[in-house]
Image (spheres, rainbow, N blue to C red):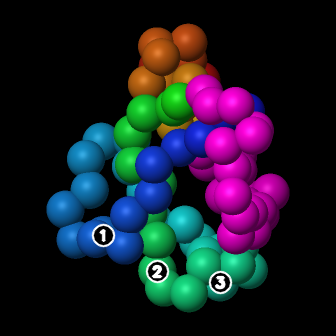
Amino acid sequence: MFIVPLTSKTAYLKEGEFILKDWQKSGLNIQTAIKTGIYTISSKLVLKEIGNLTKDDFEKLRLSRLLDLRLLDLRLM
């Protein structure tokens, strides 16, 4: 299972970090941003699922991670 860090402190985001457009639809209580990084954990460690990203936010996350990993070059698009 892949997880990404989240934060409610959205004032000073770094490159590659972004505020979720549909944070309420995703089941979150307050405006939330995706932080940089991607991690793997065992699904046995997940105690509670809060929600799921919408298609738009998931696509933004996907592109952000591809850029972070240098698997996508915007100059070629």
Sequence-wise, the earlier of marks 1 and 2 is: 1
For image coordinates 70% across by 79% down, the residue present is 27
Amino acid marked by disc 1:
Thr
For image coordinates 80% across by 57% down, the residue present is 55
- Residue 31 is marked as 2
Whether the residues at callouts 1 and 2 have beta carbons within 8 Å, the answer is yes
**For residue 47: magenta?**
yes
**What residue is pinned by disc 1?**
10
Q: Position of residue 53 (x, y in %)?
A: 73, 61
Amino acid marked by disc 2:
Gln
Whether the residues at callouts 1 and 3 have beta carbons within 8 Å, the answer is no
For image coordinates 60% across by 27% down, the residue present is 40
Residue 14 falls left or right of residue 55: left
Residue 74 visible in the snapshot: no
Crowdedness near tag 3: few (<14), some (14–19) or many (≥20) residues, C-alpha within 10 Å: some
Amino acid marked by disc 3:
Gln
Label 1 and label 2: CA atoms lie apart by 8 Å
On-image quarter of the N terminus: top right
For image coordinates 43% across by 25% down, the residue present is 68
SS class, disc 3: loop
SS class, disc 2: loop
Label 2 and label 3: CA atoms lie apart by 8 Å
**What residue is pinned by disc 3?**
24
Image height of 8 relative to 34, above or below:
below
Q: Nearer the viewer, residue 9 or 73?
A: 9
Sequence-wise, the earlier of marks 1 and 3 is: 1
Tell me the magenta residue range: 40-62
Label 1 and label 3: CA atoms lie apart by 15 Å
Image height of 33 relative to 66, above or below:
below
